[in-house]
Image (cartoon, helix red, strand yellow):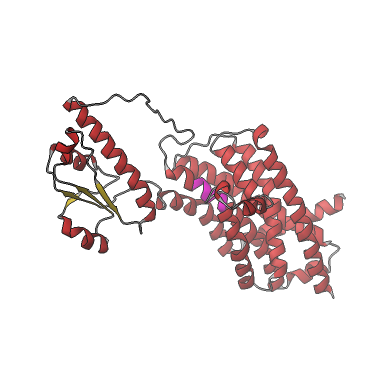
């Protein structure tokens, strides 16, 4: 037993030396846990920013001026005043995403209690801005109309007043979400790529034959690759959380980082096993890359990071409960966003551990078969 552990340790050190001399992989690791996280936080925005707006003001009243003045940067660009017959040309040429049409006598009809209507034209090809912008316009119109009626003495008291309190991300900063989710995705992708590439590199360089003539078992060779590359991912994750997420992006981490790193280490048994399994199916790095696209990208898209599990079809939800990345995303969000402790996340820890054991066994069987084929 001790001899086997020593073999795994020494082979793992060899893996670390090999990785150190693989400049492409080193650059990929640095990029994935630093620049990738930073650019995801600032390059992908879920807020309304610099939306192009035009107003067809047929009323020319005090209230219509209030609507125009309420559209302020950084959400909106300065509104352009256009005629009604210029709407189609402006939206077809992508000059305006939103066009607000204020009909004639809008203010007087409102004061007379006639409930006039406004028209808002939206270019829905800008899907993200279209959905968020419609809500912004509704709030602006409602707020400015209430303020105007209050000044005119026509305000109507409402029996119910709603106060919304947003937990965990009170300012709805998209960088708080995208940076952490990019880190979570990088952990999955890099752990699979590193272990798979390490095995294929051994095969392409011919060093796997050197290992086979030594008194080593397939289990020892596989576990060495898992712990060495897993250690690199854990260290890179800790550095990214501290330097990029907390320091550079100023994203508050609510939960325990040691608890999260323990969960990452537990999850890596699953993801690195997937990498080894895919590497035994592929005969070259291009084939491994194709298998990676077919397996890992759907995992990242359907694990709850991009779209909530609850919004997926029920059959797909049941399938994704068997995928370890689903539980990884769930306990990552619980710990990092909501400050959950082990008493809340232990079911996902247990599910990740069970998945890791199953995948480790499957990868071990497949790896042993590939080793036997090389020896034959």
Foreground: 293 or 192? Answer: 293
Residue 61, image x, y percentages: 12, 40
Above or below for 140 versus 83: above
Foreground: 376 or 344? Answer: 344
Tell me if residue 48 can be seen. no
Q: Residue at x 49, y 50 (%)?
A: 37
Above or below for 33 versus 221: above
Q: Quadrant of residue 151?
A: top left
Instruction: Please report the bounds of the magenta region as a residue range.
Output: 179-185
- The answer to whether 131 appears left or right of 369 in the picture is left
Question: Which quadrant: the C terminus?
Answer: bottom right
**Residue that sits furthest to the bottom in the current view:** 376
Q: Quadrant of residue 258?
A: top right
Q: Does residue 241 belong to the magenta stretch?
A: no
Tell me if residue 253 can be seen. yes
For the image, the number of numbered tags is 0
Foreground: 72 or 342? Answer: 72
Residue 299, image x, y percentages: 61, 56
**Residue that sits furthest to the front in the current view:** 114
Q: Main structural element of the magenta stretch: helix, strand or loop?
A: helix
Above or below for 112 versus 191: above
Q: Residue at x 78, y 65 (%)?
A: 366
Foreground: 239 or 307? Answer: 307
Residue 235, image x, y percentages: 61, 47
Residue 260, image x, y percentages: 62, 40
Q: Does residue 184 belong to the magenta stretch?
A: yes
Q: Residue at x 49, y 34 (%)?
A: 168
């Amino acid at each position: 037993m001790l001899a086997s552990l020593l073999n795994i340790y020494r082979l793992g050190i060899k893996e670390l030396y090999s990785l150190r001399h693989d400049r492409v992989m080193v650059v990929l690791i640095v990029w994935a846990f630093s620049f990738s996280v930073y650019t995801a936080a600032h390059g992908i925005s879920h807020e309304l920013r610099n939306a192009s707006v035009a107003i067809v003001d047929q009323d020319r009243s005090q209230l219509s001026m209030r609507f125009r003045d309420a559209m302020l940067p950084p959400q909106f660009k300065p509104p352009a005043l256009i005629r009604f017959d210029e709407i189609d040309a402006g939206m077809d040429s992508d000059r305006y995403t939103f066009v607000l049409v204020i009909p004639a006598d809008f203010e007087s009809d409102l004061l007379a209690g006639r409930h006039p209507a406004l028209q808002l034209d939206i270019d829905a090809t800008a899907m993200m801005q279209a959905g968020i912008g419609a809500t912004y316009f509704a709030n602006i119109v409602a707020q400015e109309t209430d303020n105007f009626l209050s000044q005119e003495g026509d305000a109507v008291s409402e029996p119910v007043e709603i106060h919304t309190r947003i937990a965990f991300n009170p300012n709805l900063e998209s960088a708080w979400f995208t940076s952490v989710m990019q880190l979570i995705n990088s952990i999955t992708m890099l752990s699979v790529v590193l272990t798979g590439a390490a095995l294929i590199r051994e095969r392409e360089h011919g060093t796997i034959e050197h290992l086979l003539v030594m008194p080593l078992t397939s289990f020892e060779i596989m576990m060495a690759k898992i712990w060495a590359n897993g250690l690199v991912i854990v260290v890179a994750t800790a550095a990214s959380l501290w330097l990029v997420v907390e320091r550079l992006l100023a994203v508050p981490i609510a939960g325990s980082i040691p608890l999260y790193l323990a969960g990452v280490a537990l999850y890596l048994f699953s993801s690195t096993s997937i990498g080894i399994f895919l590497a035994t199916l592929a005969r070259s790095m291009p084939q491994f890359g194709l298998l990676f696209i077919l397996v890992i990208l759907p995992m990242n898209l359907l694990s709850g990071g991009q779209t909530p599990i609850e919004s997926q079809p029920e059959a797909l939800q049941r399938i994704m409960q068997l995928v370890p990345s689903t539980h990884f995303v769930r306990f990552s969000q619980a710990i990092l966003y909501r400050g959950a402790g082990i008493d809340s996340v232990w079911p996902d820890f247990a599910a990740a551990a069970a998945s890791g054991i199953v995948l480790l066994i499957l990868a071990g069987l497949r790896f042993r078969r590939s080793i036997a084929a090389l020896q034959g």
